[in-house]
Image (cartoon, rainbow, N blue to C red):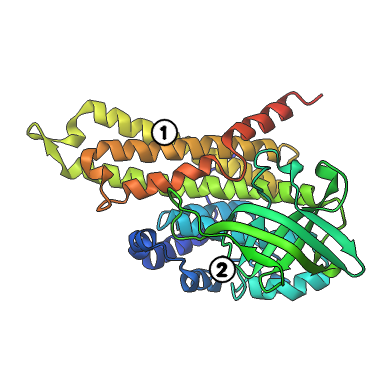
Amino acid sequence: MDFTLSEDQQAIFETARAFAASELAPHSARWDEEKVFPVETLRAAAALGLAGIYVKDDVGGSALGRLDAALVFEALSYGDVSTAAFLSIHNMASWMIDRFGSESLRRKYLPRLTTMELIASYCLTEPGSGSDAASLRTTAKREGDEYVLNGAKAFISGAGTSDVYVVMARTGAEGAAGVSTFVVEKASPGLSFGGQERKMGWASQPTAMVHFDGVRVPAENRVGEEGQGFRFAMMGLDGGRLNIAACSLGGAQLALDTATAYLDSRKQFGRALREFQGLQFKLADMATELDAARLMVRRGAAAMDAGDPRATQYCAMAKRFATDAGFEVANQALQLHGGYGYLKDYPLERIVRDLRVHQILEGTNEIMRVIIARELLRP
């Protein structure tokens, strides 16, 4: 069991980390404050191959693995959690088209998705179906060579800005077996968007409802066969959970490094804070939790790359542990700064706000426990 990254993996990590340092970190506070969605910066990331990380190379993807992706998102999140997380969502939507779409659908969209000439969003959650995703109500009725979509999706990252929406809609009976997947273009008549949500964090990416009012979608834009969409969505989320967990690692590592530097420079009671054993213990615990989380994320990614039948369980474990640990590390780093940690002059309050949602999206951490228990109790 080798925990050392290969030369290629180290190069991937360092490339993403350098991009984060030069293109994300200097702007992160302003993007958060002004709610800027940095599309051109995302396209610059795409030029490095980071918009189609595990998309096949015949359509412009990088054809890398899930461990490579985990390294990328950890590195990018060290510069800006919110922007890195959106890039994760774009990658997930693109991968679904690449993995399950027809050859014509792949050729139609992926060359422009991998450059981020087109930006993609993932549309599963609805106002009435969050954790119970299989109960979704958005419908897609077949009419000749088209499907007509009606319904609404909630909490959609990129809504109103993205050009392409990978949408799960009901084509059949109740339950998971009645769900299919479609690629819907922004310009489609009947497609509209709600107002921007006023969020605690993730301010550098837009979030809104997506409304479908008689939206006609060519049958050729269906991904895979009817009734397979829920399985596609769940397979997409396995990787999405690892990516969001990796984003928690990057944000938490920045918080830990910032706190370590602060304890080195700040003095109280005539001594540097680093000399107080109680604070040393706190740093030690933070570093240990973060390293354990990193190992779990990389084990889950390696399991996906290897086709391990336990990959779904490992991904759920990694997402639950890493997002909880990442938030706690960031919160403790803020505490170590005292009142200064609460100010926007320091990155801690932004990291805490951005990481909090990771415990909710891509399946809440309560649902991760459901998945883990289901796998453990499987006959």
Quarter containing the N terminus: top right
The percent coordinates of residue 302 (x first, y second) are 64, 46
Task: Mark 2: give few (<14), some (14-19) or many (20+) Cα within 10 Å.
Answer: some
The percent coordinates of residue 137 (x first, y second) are 75, 48
Mark 1 or 2, closer to the camera = 2
Given residues 249 and 320, the one toward you in this image is 320
- Residue visible at 23% across and 27% down? 277
Quarter containing the C terminus: top right
Q: Secondary structure at mark 1?
A: helix
Task: Mark 1: give few (<14), some (14-19) or many (20+) Cα within 10 Å.
Answer: few
In the displayed structure, does residue 32 sit left or right of residue 280? Answer: right
The percent coordinates of residue 148 (x first, y second) are 82, 63
- Residue visible at 53% across and 60% down? 195
- Residue visible at 34% across and 32% down? 284
According to the picture, the residue beneath numbered tag 2 turns out to be 161
Extreme residue toward the left, this view: 270
Q: Secondary structure at mark 2?
A: loop
According to the picture, the residue beneath numbered tag 1 turns out to be 288
What's under tag 2, amino acid-wise?
A: Thr
- Whichever of labels 1 and 2 marks the residue nearer the N terminus, that label is 2
What's under tag 1, amino acid-wise?
A: Thr
Hey, which quadrant is residue 17 in on the image? bottom left
Assess whether mark 2 and mark 1 are in contact (beta carbons under 8 angstroms): no
In the depicted structure, whether residue 342 falls above or below residue 56: above
Residue 4 shows up from this direction: no
The percent coordinates of residue 235 (x first, y second) are 72, 48
In the displayed structure, does residue 20 sit left or right of residue 239? Answer: left
Q: Indicate which disc residue 187 carries.
A: none
